[in-house]
Amino acid sequence: LKTSAVARINSAADDVEALRVKLLGKKGELTALLKGMKDVAPEERKAVGAIGNDVRQTITSLLAAKKAAQDAEKLNEQLAAETIDVTLPGSTPTIGQPHVLQQIIDEIEQHFLGLGFKIIDDTVDSPEVETDEYNFERENLPKDHPARDMQDTFYITPEILLRTQTSPVQSRALEKHDFSKGPLKMIAPGKVYRRDTDDATHSHQFHQVEGMVVGENITMADLKGTLLSIMQELFGEKHQIRMRPSYFPFTEPSVEVDVSWNEVTPDMSPEDIEWIEVLGAGMTHPNVLRMDGIDPDKYSAFAFGLGPDRFAMLKYGVDDIRQFYLNDVRFLSQFERKG
Ligand code: FA5
């Protein structure tokens, strides 16, 4: 048995375990042989038993060695098969990027941080679910004010609504501001909602960036300079801005701001400039300051509300605002963040 077992183990192709069962298992060949012990004369049993043990040990260690050799061979084969061929062309993994609207908002934030503005934390002081009081009343829009119709509103209860503008953040920021530490200079980016019918330039959900500066001797010139700086940052030095008289209940005077779509050069006549409206702004109404506990004789303020969705449309030539909200990767992947 020993001789034949050694030969069989050496030539075993793969299933060492099956061979072990065959040789040493309960119904195996060695067991069968040892069953014959009962016929062996008692004085020879010891010697025969020793031979049996020797055979078992030899077979066991040979099987173990064979198994180890086979495992090593398998491992080598696997390693050879898994070797990376560095000469094969690589496949580029898809890497995500911030949404194009977030990119515009980031650019606006960076610009205003550079001007010393603070950004209002939109998780704490800039709620999307607002009260009628902050969204309208504190913005000089009492319940029966006709200008409420300018912004069609999603009401949750008669007093709670989805904010139609980021302007309520003005009051929330003012409440927390300590004027002994200097003027308030803030921006507040965020989402707003209106019951507008969606079309190419209107979405029922869009973004605004509110801005406000409150301090002593703040003038319309400060407002104009601030808006000019952000427009030129986003659209380039050669673009002009134009302020047109407008109406908002919370600012007096109020303006709407156009940015020149084409670049303006000294030799151009005014008729050649193409203007596009991008935001609303003005000098904060004394009523608003008073409701926020600020003395309008001591302080003056300007505020603006700009629409990053419209900015992105202009900047990238997107002709339908709904594209921003469809989450089509083919569309969004065009706007790779630069730098
Ligand atoms: C306001 O919401 C005022 N709160 C802005 C303001 C703030 C004025 C502070 C004065 C002082 P208006 O409704 O015009 O204003 O909206 C401002 C900007 O939001 C618009 O210029 C436009 O860029 C954008 N916008 C308005 N409605 C939509 C809409 N349905 N879809 C996309 N963008 C919109």
Image: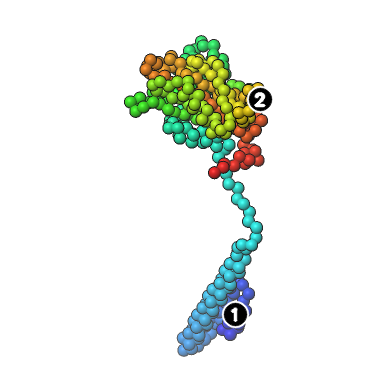
> Residue sitting at 41 percent across and 23 percent down?
214
Quadrant position of the C terminus in the picture: top right
Quadrant position of the N terminus in the picture: bottom right
> Residue sitting at 57 percent across and 23 percent down?
242
Other-residue count near label 1 (Cα within 10 Å), few / some / many at <14 / 14–19 / ≥20 = few
Q: In this figure, which colouring scheme has been used for the structure?
A: rainbow
Q: Secondary structure at mark 1?
A: helix
> Residue sitting at 63 percent across and 28 percent down?
267
Q: Quadrant of residue 216?
A: top left
User: Disc 1 marks which amino acid?
Assistant: Asn
User: Disc 2 marks which amino acid?
Assistant: Asp
> Residue sitting at 47 percent across and 29 percent down?
188
Q: Is residue 300 left or right of residue 6?
A: left
How far across and down, in percent of the image, does residue 304 sit?
50, 23
- The residue that label 2 is drawn on is 272
Q: In this orientation, does residue 144 appear? A: yes
Q: Earlier in the sequence, mark 1 or mark 2?
A: 1
Q: Which mark is residue 10?
A: 1
Q: Which mark is residue 53?
A: none
